[in-house]
Image: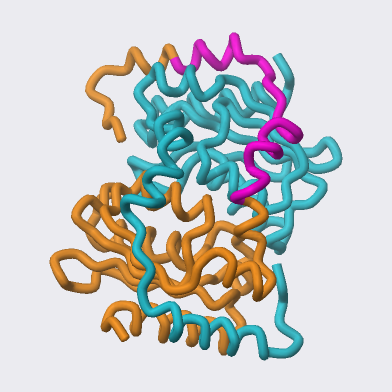
Chain colours: A orange, B cyan
Amino acid sequence: MNKFMKIAFEEAKKGIWAGHGGPFGSVIVKDGKIVSKGHNHVVVNNDPTCHGEIDAIRKACKKLKTFDLSGCEIYTTGFPCPMCFCAILWANIDKVYYGCNTTDTETIGFRDKAFEESIAKKKKSICQELDREECLKLYQDYNNIENKTNY
Amino acid sequence: MNKFMKIAFEEAKKGIWAGHGGPFGSVIVKDGKIVSKGHNHVVVNNDPTCHGEIDAIRKACKKLKTFDLSGCEIYTTGFPCPMCFCAILWANIDKVYYGCNTTDTETIGFRDKAFEESIAKKKKSICQELDREECLKLYQDYNNIENKTNY
């Protein structure tokens, strides 16, 4: 077994036996060294966003004092859900190694695959535009701020 | 202007003038009452996952002591990026009211639209399966745990 995946695996295992959440562990690696480890804490933290990948990303960013993880790789026991996959893109992580795929994850009762398939439909059914004109003024204000940090 | 969107707007405004991040504020409402307010803290917190919606979701879950926000609505100044949209689905939020759309958000320099369009491509280019067989054992262990909290 790959040495970093092994650590992601152990991290996930620790989480499930402690009742923290699903069997999802992640390790972030830079230049061959571990930057952070994370696992799913949804149940224990009452935080639906605290998946293994996001837990590891937050910790890596805290450690490296940046929101930009360019040059990093992530090892994760299950293929990232759309939330985590986009978090990986926002963080500029270069490479994702995953163990189980989305169908495997569906088999143990998680909604990742359903979300992947239904997101386009849900975007139409549950979303409604409201006060765009006023919100555009906010965007304009932001755009006019000089020397801001773009990300 | 809608009263909840107005509060999301003010929350975003506070954030941009404080240099916290982009012009994105969110309010979560249940039964006509505000549960939480959030805004983008990516830059100030060095947390690429701390978008306005996720900030508001975390706070609402903490307040209501649950990871399940069924019965809640979210008001947000910009259409949620794929990360936030999926976080909204994981949290079981029923309805999303948004001000600016994804094209508006692209205009002020954010990558939401690019991510929406390139996610399928990126999934192929940056992801690689690794040690699935071992990771499936982890899933099996999880599956065998009795009386666990499914979410």
> Disc count in the image?
0
> Residue B148: which quarter of the image?
bottom right
Give above or below for A54 relative to A41: above
Give above or below for A87 relative to A9: above
> Residue B143: which quarter of the image?
bottom right
Q: Is residue B102 magenta?
A: no
Q: Residue B25: horizontal and vertical position, in percent?
A: 55, 32
The C terminus of chain B is located in which quarter?
bottom right
What range is drawn magenta here?
A: A116-139
The N terminus of chain B is located in which quarter?
top right
Q: Residue A108: horizontal and vertical position, in percent?
A: 65, 75
Viewer-closest of A138 and B113: B113
Report whether A102 appears left or right of B34: left
Q: Residue at x 43, y 73 (%)?
A: A99
Q: Residue B38: horizontal and vertical position, in percent?
A: 56, 40
Q: Is residue A121 magenta?
A: yes
Q: Residue at x 51, y 28 (%)?
A: B12
Report whether B47 appears left or right of A2: right
Question: For the view shown, which residue lies furthest in the left direction?
Answer: A31
Give above or below for B96 relative to B144: above
Q: Residue at x 41, y 51 (%)?
A: B123
Report whether A134 appears left or right of A5: right
Q: Residue at x 38, y 68 (%)?
A: B129
